Structures are given as C-alpha cells and as structure tokens.
Amino acid sequence: MTLLLSLLLVHLLADFPFQSQRMAKLKQRQLRVLLGHMTVHSIGTAVVLGIFYTWGDLSGATAWIIGGVIIGTHVLLDGSPFKRLLHPALAFWIDQLLHLAILTGIVIYLTPVDWPTTFPLLDQVLWVSVWGLIATELIGRGIAPLLAPFAPRLIESHFERKVTRKEQLDGLKRSVTHEVEDSARSYTTEINGVGRYIGLVERAIIVCLVAVNATGAIGFIIALKALARFKQFDDRRFAEYYIIGSLLSILAALLCGMVIRLAF
C-alpha cells in the first residue's frame, strides 16, 4: 500500500502543482515541453522506487519494470495526437483515468498490496496527501473544461448619452442639456484565474472539515463564497454557471473527505 500511495502522490504532484495549464496544452505540440514534464515524472518515480529498493521491498528487476511501464505509457498518452480530436473535458478525464489505472494495475500485479486493518502513520500521511490532491487539483482541473461551454463572458461597453434637465436661475426657468458618458459592465468572468484558487481553497477546507467530522461549518464556507458573488447573481447565466460549478466542487470535496476518514 505504501509503494502504491507513494507513486500515486508522485503522479499527482507532477501532473498538477508541477505542471501549469500552459504546459499541459503545449506538451502535445512541443517536444521540449513534453520532455521537461516527463523529466519531473521520471525523477519522482525513480526516487520512490530507489527508496523501496534500498529498503529491500523491491527487487531491481521489479523496480525497472514498474518504472518503465509508468513512464513509457505516460509518454505515449501525453504525446498522443488523438487527444486533440476529443472534447477537452473528455480528453482530460480519459487521460487521467488511464494514468491512474495503469499505475495502480502494474503495482498490484507485481507487488503484494493488501488493505491494512489499521493505517500506519506514513500511510495515513500519504493517503491524506493523495486524496487531498485529487479533491483540490485533479477535480478542479477536471471541472473547468466540463463547464467551459456554459461559462459567461465579460461584457463591457461605453456609450454617451444626452441628459436634459430643467434649471431655475434668478427666477428664470430653462432647459439645459448635458452629455454624459456611461459604461455598462457585466461582471461575469473571473479576474486572472482567481476563481480557480478560490475553488481550490474551498475544496481543501471542506475536505478537512469532513475528515475531522466538523461538517456543520461547511455552510459558513458556502455562504462566504456566495456573499462575495452576490451582485453577480443578477446575471442569470452566471448564477446557473456558479451553482453548477459549486455543487460539483462541493460534492467532490465531500466524497474525498469521506474517503480520507477511512484511514483513521
């Protein structure tokens, strides 16, 4: 279990915190970017396998086979041109599910993986880290392309209008016309990707609250987030987009938090 969790953690770290969204898009077109990404994966995988080989939990041949399968299939999947033919959301989820399935399958096939009756401290740390990254990073990256077709856009326009009002000066009434410049703006998009970080922190907090069985405080997190967006709810399209995204995000965080509790 420790080896499997360690390799899963390496995969999630290399694919999300250590890989920007720009790198994720360019690695299918630029070999340099793909090689850089695979270097991070290879170093992390080699370190984990080397540690377990040093501890005597893995033979040299088994370590080479596991590392070769993980890195080789990762290169093939990340460099595959077929992903460009799929919808971005479908391509993302198929890619990640295949990565995780291949990694889990080869480790279970070549090494004994038993579900422990009690998780030792190291496995608890790894379990929390893996599911924490799934809840915050993987789910967040996966929800974004799913909702992209429904995402509202920022609409801003400037226009001039004439305003006529009646004024009275020294007992004389007259009509005065002024030119006024107005602007109309629909605040329906996120600025500099701040929304992604808000969602990440929101899911992290919900996971922690569920893990420690303090679910009553989740309502305050949801209310705080909604309060910050209150004025934007006048835009029906934004409100629907916000509600769908928030519900998916909260549901994923709740499920991951419940899974984390299994280790304690």
Image (cartoon, rainbow, N blue to C red):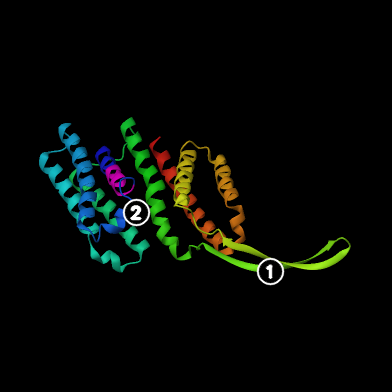
| Magenta span contains residue 13 | yes
From the viewer's perspective, is residue 148 above or below residue 133? below
From the viewer's perspective, is residue 206 above or below residue 27? above
In terms of sequence position, does the residue under pointer 2 or pointer 1 come before the other?
2
Q: Is residue 145 left or right of residue 12?
A: right
Quarter assignment of residue 178: bottom right
Q: Is residue 5 left or right of residue 209?
A: left
- Number of disc labels: 2
Q: Are marks 2 and 1 in contact (CB under 8 Å)?
A: no
- Identify the residue shown where x is 13% and y is 44%: 64
Mark 1 = which residue?
162
* Amino acid type assigned to the residue bearing label 1 in the image: Lys
Q: Report the disc number at residue 21.
A: 2
User: What are the residue bounds of the magenta stretch?
Assistant: 8-16
Label 1 Cα crowd, 10 Å radius (few <14 / some 14-19 / many 20+): few
Quarter assignment of residue 263: top left
Q: Real-space Cα distance between discs 2 and 1? A: 47 Å
Local secondary structure at mark 1: strand
Quadrant including the C terminus: top left
